[in-house]
Image (cartoon, grey):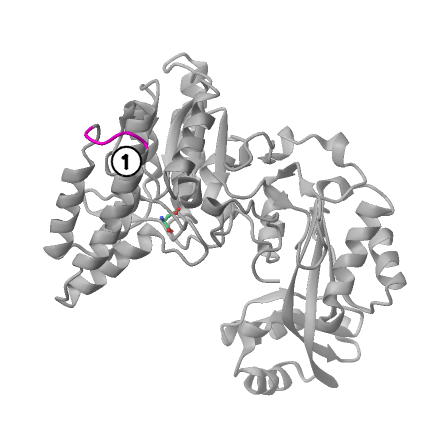
């Protein structure tokens, strides 16, 4: 189920029909590893500073990030203004670049990429740049802001920079930069250039500590401000961006830096659905989910905001609220930490169901396998030596299986089989393709008897054969492997067992 497992049906107002997903990307490297440790340390330090009164505890404030479809044209900008002005706590706004107005429209960011690619080949980009200019100028004039922004000069400067050889990262970042000038003029507040407050190291990794300090110092002291999403700058002023869709990260960073009470992520859907609407018609929306549940669901293929995109908010325990710019009265989905979650609401219930097709099972049998010290290690090291990452290892007394995604073993199956035979000497070795893996996720299932039985009974009633069962030690998921042909029937059966019965 790659893709849109969790997107509610879109609001089909003509200005908001983009195909943008809530978020579907990963942020390699720069968001992982050491930086998380740095972040935890800095949060710890901040708490100690707050307790000891060295720094002032933050005022109530909400950071609102608006995605590209929320800022695709002037009518969308007006919705943004109404949302921000309806709550005085909404003090900090993080805009994306203007996105698609209709499904076949182009995102401003993509137009900037085109301009830079043309310039790099010494081809004229005037026509494409003209389209960028027209989009921005149309928005400014429709909002009655002509003459009240620095946009015309900024557009000239960016054009010259691209003409003079600016790289593609710089070009891509300009969509947000220019948009922030308009949003700030519309809201009558200051635009703080992300290059001044989102700090990268010279190797392109995010510098959390510097970013926090700069945001607290430069943005947190302002009553209201706009900070463009998606980019920041390295020590020499060189522009760096996050992965595509990365304004979500900026929003989470600003929330962290100013100590926001909530991070609102405004998009064109009303939150996260319990399961894929292409499999279950009209699935219920999830009102509240925890970061851990989000991670499980996102990993299993649901198209939701990835936890990597909001890790600064998570680390600082700032709830994230996914909201719909086209339906601002809908409370959306709230993502919270475990200790903020309302457990009573979910006890005995599930939060969502996600799944992925295209897995292959390597099944081994060997008498007295359970006595052979190191058998599992030998088997897994074969996969490791071929650079294959595995998902599950269900085992019996004399059997052990390794479940891997098809994409991991493409073109490697024969070599893997040879090496497994040589290393492990199994009596039987089978490769079983066409498996789908389905995760039923819910914090409410931990220590609630009968939840697994409900899943298995539903599958039995639907005549779905279960090929694998796995449960993480956190007890917030039950994972089953079924034949790919049974995938949709299985998801429907589990959903109906918990929601409709
Ligand atoms: N404008 C950037 C993109 O198209 C970043 C974002 O929208 O979040 O990916």
**Residue 461 point in image, percent of width and height:** 89, 62
Residue at 62% of width from left, 62% of height from top? 1
Residue 70 position, x and y percent, is 44, 40
The answer, for residue 210, to whether it is visible in the render is no
- In the rendering, at what x and y percent does residue 477 appear? 71, 50
Q: Residue 367 at x, y = what percent?
A: 79, 80
Asked if residue 490 is positioned above or below residue 419 in the image, the reply reads above
Q: Is residue 187 left or right of residue 387?
A: left
Residue at far top of view: 53
* Residue 463 falls inside the magenta stretch: no
Q: Give the left or right position of residue 414, taking residue 171 as reference.
A: right
Q: Which segment did they paint magenta?
A: 143-147
State the SS at label 1: helix
Dot 1 alpha-carbon crowd within 10 angstroms: few under 14, some 14 to 19, many 20 or more: many
Magenta stretch mostly in which secondary structure?
A: loop
Q: Is residue 131 above or below residue 184?
A: below
Left or right: residue 354 compared with residue 212:
right
In the rendered image, the vertical position of residue 181 relative to residue 426, given as above or below: above
Examine the image and state in which quarter residue 46 appears: top left
370 relative position to 68: left or right = right
Residue 120 seen by the camera: yes
**At 86% from the left edge and 52% from the top edge, which residue is drawn?**
454
The one of 156 and 16 positioned closer to us in this rendering: 16
Q: Please identify the quarter of the rendering in which residue 49 is found.
A: top left
Looking at the image, which is closer to me, 156 or 380? 156
Q: Residue at x 66, y 59 (%)?
A: 278
Name the residue that disc number 1 marks.
140
Please state which of residues 494 and 161 is positioned toward the viewer in this rendering: 161
């Amino acid at each position: 189920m790659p893709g849109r497992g969790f997107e509610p049906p879109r609001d089909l107002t003509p200005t908001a029909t983009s195909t943008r997903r809530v978020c579907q990307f990963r942020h390699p490297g720069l968001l992982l590893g050491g930086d998380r440790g740095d972040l935890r340390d800095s949060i710890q330090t901040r708490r100690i500073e707050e307790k000891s009164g060295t720094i002032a505890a933050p005022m109530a404030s909400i950071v609102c990030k608006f995605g590209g479809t929320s800022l695709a044209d002037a009518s969308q900008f007006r919705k943004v203004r109404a949302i921000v002005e309806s709550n005085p706590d909404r003090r900090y706004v993080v805009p994306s670049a203007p996105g698609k107005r209709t499904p076949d429209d182009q995102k401003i960011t993509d137009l900037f990429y085109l301009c830079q690619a043309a310039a790099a080949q010494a081809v004229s980009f005037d026509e494409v740049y003209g389209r960028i200019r027209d989009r921005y100028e149309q928005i400014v004039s429709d909002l009655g802001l002509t003459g009240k922004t620095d946009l015309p000069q900024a557009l000239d400067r960016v054009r010259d920079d691209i003409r003079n050889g600016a790289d593609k990262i710089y070009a891509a970042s300009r969509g947000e930069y220019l948009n922030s000038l308009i949003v700030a003029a519309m809201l009558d507040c200051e635009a703080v250039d992300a290059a001044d407050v989102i700090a990268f190291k010279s190797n392109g990794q995010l510098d959390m500590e510097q970013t926090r300090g700069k945001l607290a110092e430069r943005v947190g002291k302002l009553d209201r401000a706009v900070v463009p999403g998606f980019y920041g700058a390295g020590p020499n002023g060189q522009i760096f961006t996050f992965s595509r869709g990365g304004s979500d990260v900026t929003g989470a960073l600003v929330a962290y830096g100013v100590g926001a009470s909530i991070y609102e992520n405004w998009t064109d859907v009303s939150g996260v659905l319990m399961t894929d609407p292409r499999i279950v018609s009209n699935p219920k929306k999830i009102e509240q989910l925890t970061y851990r549940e989000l991670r499980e669901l996102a990993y299993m293929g649901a198209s939701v905001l990835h936890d990597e995109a909001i890790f600064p908010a998570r680390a600082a325990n700032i709830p994230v609220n996914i909201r719909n710019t086209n339906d601002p009265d809908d409370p959306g989905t709230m993502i919270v930490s475990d200790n903020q979650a309302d457990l009573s609401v979910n006890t005995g219930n599930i939060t969502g169901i996600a799944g992925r097709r295209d897995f292959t099972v390597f099944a081994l049998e060997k008498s007295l396998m359970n006595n052979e010290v190191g058998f599992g290690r030998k088997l897994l090291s074969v996969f490791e030596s071929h650079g294959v990452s595995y998902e599950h290892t269900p085992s019996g007394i004399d059997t052990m299986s390794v479940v891997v995604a098809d994409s991991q073993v493409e073109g490697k199956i024969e070599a893997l089989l040879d090496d497994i035979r040589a290393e492990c000497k199994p009596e039987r070795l089978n490769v079983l393709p066409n498996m789908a893996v389905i995760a039923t996720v819910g914090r409410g299932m931990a220590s609630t008897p009968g939840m697994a039985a409900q899943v298995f009974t539903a599958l039995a009633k639907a005549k779905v054969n279960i090929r694998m069962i796995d449960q993480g030690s956190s007890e917030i998921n039950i994972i089953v492997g079924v034949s790919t042909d049974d995938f949709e029937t299985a998801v429907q059966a589990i959903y109906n067992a918990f929601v409709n019965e």
